[in-house]
């Protein structure tokens, strides 16, 4: 059943069609990778993206959200995508590459050529993945400090440099590489975005082992040649494209973090109702009840924020929402971490044990406050929008 919060508040309420959509995702999740099945599919949680599950979701039209039907998609808007992201994160769907793919889809929708849309959007709608490469060893939060370069030569782009923390590049057919194609009066000028096929000569990657698994990579581009039409949008407009995309990225990651938070909350709540100590359930103790009251309040606040900003994005896709998008990213990711930490505390030793999922929820939640712009960067952006 859908949780009651979907209908308690007018701003949270979904249409009948949207509720059916949410139910179908939950039913699919429970059936296809519920219980121990997820561990088998992901090889003990090491491979967090299943090509087979992605293909089956694509057949249902779920991966074609925000893609026009003429490019093979199922239509829908950003609000629909936010619902989907929350539910697949809550259901632990092994399609980790979808969130970053959706970021690339947004860029293609706004800046891509017809040929790029027909090729790349069609791949996504069929279950394929895309990735984006921004960060470098010395350019993380300060993206404008990047050194990867591209020059024109014999009707091609020749790309050189390296990238860090490129999530799911090993699953993507193409990686959208942010690079420097010229110089200007400021560091923000002369940046461009180029789609590099994963199989291109001179392009390679090495997986980075992290606390959460091996879903991210270091990329190497050595005289990597790609066609001239691999450029996204206008040469030198990369910074503007990035700023537009980062706002969407923060809402996308926020919806995902909200699902992670809800999953940790749900499992901790079920445990508190069943676990008995001193002759009664631990959920009957006020100290535990207050924890859940605070977390439930935070979840409702975060859900309101995510959905309201997603609606604003649908109403005007070209509108810049730096304050609202950063608030979404900050609130949801910090909440995901809090839900997992509190869940672990409530479950005690069982929460810390690898046999139970809470420790995995914590590993998944911690990184959300880092990638896509750290919580500190989000606070900086919000403060700047306040005139500070």
Image: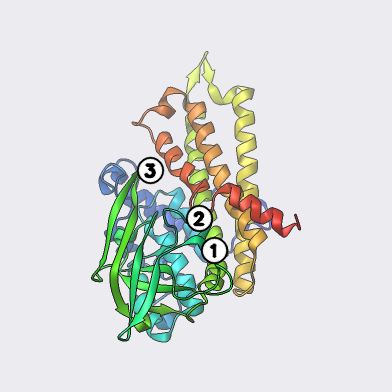
Where in the figure is residue 28, as x and y percent of width and height? 37, 55
State the SS at label 2: loop
Mark 2 and mark 3 in contact (Cβ < 8 Å)? no
Q: What residue is disc 2 on?
A: 372
State the SS at label 1: helix
Q: Nearer the viewer, residue 147 or 338?
A: 147
Q: Earlier in the sequence, mark 3 or mark 2?
A: 3
Q: What residue is disc 1 on?
A: 246
Mark 2 and mark 1 in contact (Cβ < 8 Å)? yes
Where in the figure is residue 32, as x and y percent of width and height? 32, 52
Point out which mark residue 212 bears. Answer: 3
State the SS at label 3: loop
Q: Which of marks 3 and 1 is nearer the N terminus?
A: 3
**At 33% from the left edge and 59% from the top edge, which residue is drawn?**
219
Q: In 3D space, how far apart are the residues under numbered discs 1 and 2 (Cα atoms)?
A: 8 Å
Where in the figure is residue 199, as x and y percent of width and height? 24, 69
> In the visual, does 93 lie left or right of 324?
left
Q: Quadrant of the C terminus?
A: bottom right
């Amino acid at each position: 059943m859908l949780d009651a919060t979907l209908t308690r508040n007018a701003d949270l309420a979904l249409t009948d069609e949207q509720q059916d959509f949410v139910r179908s995702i939950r039913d699919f999740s429970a059936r296809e990778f519920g219980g121990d099945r997820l561990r088998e599919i992901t090889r003990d949680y090491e491979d967090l993206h299943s090509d087979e599950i992605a293909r089956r979701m694509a057949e249902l039209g779920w991966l074609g959200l925000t893609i026009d039907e003429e490019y093979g998609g199922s239509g829908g808007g950003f609000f629909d995508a936010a619902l989907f992201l929350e539910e697949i994160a809550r259901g632990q769907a092994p399609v980790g590459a979808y969130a970053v793919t959706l970021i690339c889809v947004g860029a293609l929708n706004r800046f891509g050529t017809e040929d790029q849309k027909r090729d790349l959007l069609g791949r996504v709608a069929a279950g394929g993945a895309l990735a984006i490469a921004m960060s470098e060893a010395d350019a993380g939060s300060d993206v404008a400090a990047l050194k990867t370069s591209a020059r024109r030569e014999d009707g091609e782009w020749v790309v050189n440099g390296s990238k860090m923390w490129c999530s799911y590049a090993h699953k993507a057919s193409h990686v959208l590489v942010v690079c420097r194609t010229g110089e200007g009066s400021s560091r923000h000028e002369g940046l461009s975005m180029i789609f590099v096929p994963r199989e291109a000569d001179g392009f390679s990657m090495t997986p980075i082992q992290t606390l959460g698994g091996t879903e991210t990579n270091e990329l190497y581009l050595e005289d990597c040649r790609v066609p001239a039409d691999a450029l996204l949008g206008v040469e030198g407009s990369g910074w503007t494209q990035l700023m537009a995309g980062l706002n969407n990225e923060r809402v996308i990651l926020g919806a995902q973090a909200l699902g992670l938070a809800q999953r940790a909350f749900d499992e901790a709540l079920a445990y508190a109702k069943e676990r008995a100590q001193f002759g009664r359930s631990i959920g009957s103790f006020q100290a535990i009840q207050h924890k859940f009251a605070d977390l439930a309040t935070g979840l409702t606040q975060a859900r309101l924020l995510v959905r309201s900003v997603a609606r604003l994005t649908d109403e005007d896709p070209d509108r810049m929402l730096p304050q609202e998008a950063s608030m979404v990213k900050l609130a949801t990711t910090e909440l995901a971490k809090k839900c997992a930490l509190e869940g672990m505390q409530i479950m005690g030793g069982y929460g810390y044990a690898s046999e139970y999922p809470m420790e995995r929820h914590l590993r998944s939640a911690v990184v959300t406050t880092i990638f896509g712009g750290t919580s500190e960067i989000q606070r900086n952006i919000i403060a700047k929008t306040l005139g500070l």
